[in-house]
Image: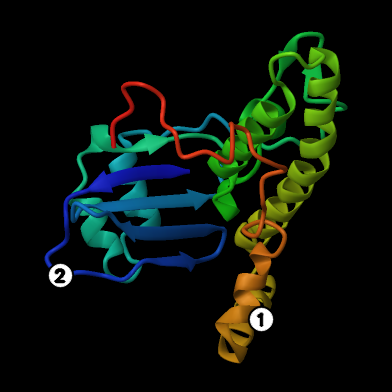
Amino acid sequence: TWRVVAPAPDRPFPPHETWGRGALWGTQPLKDGRIYAYAAATAPAGARAADDEKAELLRRFGDWHDPVPGIIAATAPEEILRNDVYRMADPLPAFHRGRTALLGDAAHAMAPTLGQGGNQAIEDGIVLAHHVTPGRDLGAGLAAYTADRLPRTAAVVRKADRVSRLMSLTGAPAVAARDFLMATVSRLGPGLVLRTFDGIADWRPPGATYAAGTTEEAPGTRR
């Protein structure tokens, strides 16, 4: 994957994600007018561009639709981040051992195709805070944390992997079938596409992780 934050383009563009043959490009406007863009492509682990990553992006995406070439052109080579993508093929048996707990990518590394890596880490923290509280048995709290989080995150890892496999298709017949399916689903209604996030975006915390039922604020609290 490659990630960049680029200067604002000459004219605004809506957010989008475009899939190609074994590659994708996404553009997201930021509140300050700049552009956050990300790209992904199938490549050997550990590979790096012979010259620089800007030249590599131009080779891979320079002939894509606007605003992709302009974003690459406006980005300094040293501002481009390139990282290999790793995921956990098999879930861990637990997210804790002794007094140690794992959260986020350390517990359930996943493909970034659903944008859930950071979100699931936040959920981990909330659930951990819910179960590990002063006065409660630590071992029981960590076991409850694992019991709550392991099945959910394993399901999200699998769903992200399925989307990643769709994006990574390179054969012409398979890509054509994928694109036809995506276009058909999109025409039938955006709600069908959003159902990918059923069971993800509707998550609710297990309970209050702070003292509820009062409006009193701690001394020195600022609004």
Q: Residue at x 74, y 35 (%)?
A: 88
Residue 35's x, y, as percent? 26, 54
Which residue was labeled with disc 2?
11
Q: Is tag 1's residue or tag 2's residue first in the polypeptide sequence?
A: 2
Report whether 165 appears left or right of 60.
Answer: right
Which residue was labeled with disc 1?
181
| In this view, 100 is above or below 150 | above
Question: Which marked residue is nearer to the observer: mark 1 or mark 2?
Answer: 2
Numbered disc 2: secondary structure: loop
Residue 119 in which image quadrant: top right
Q: Residue at x 32, y 51 (%)?
A: 36
Q: Residue furthest bottom?
A: 188
Q: Residue at x 57, y 37 (%)?
A: 122
| In this view, 22 is above or below 221 | below
Q: Nearer the viewer, residue 144 or 54?
A: 144
Residue 113's x, y, as percent? 58, 53
Residue 22's x, y, as percent? 57, 58
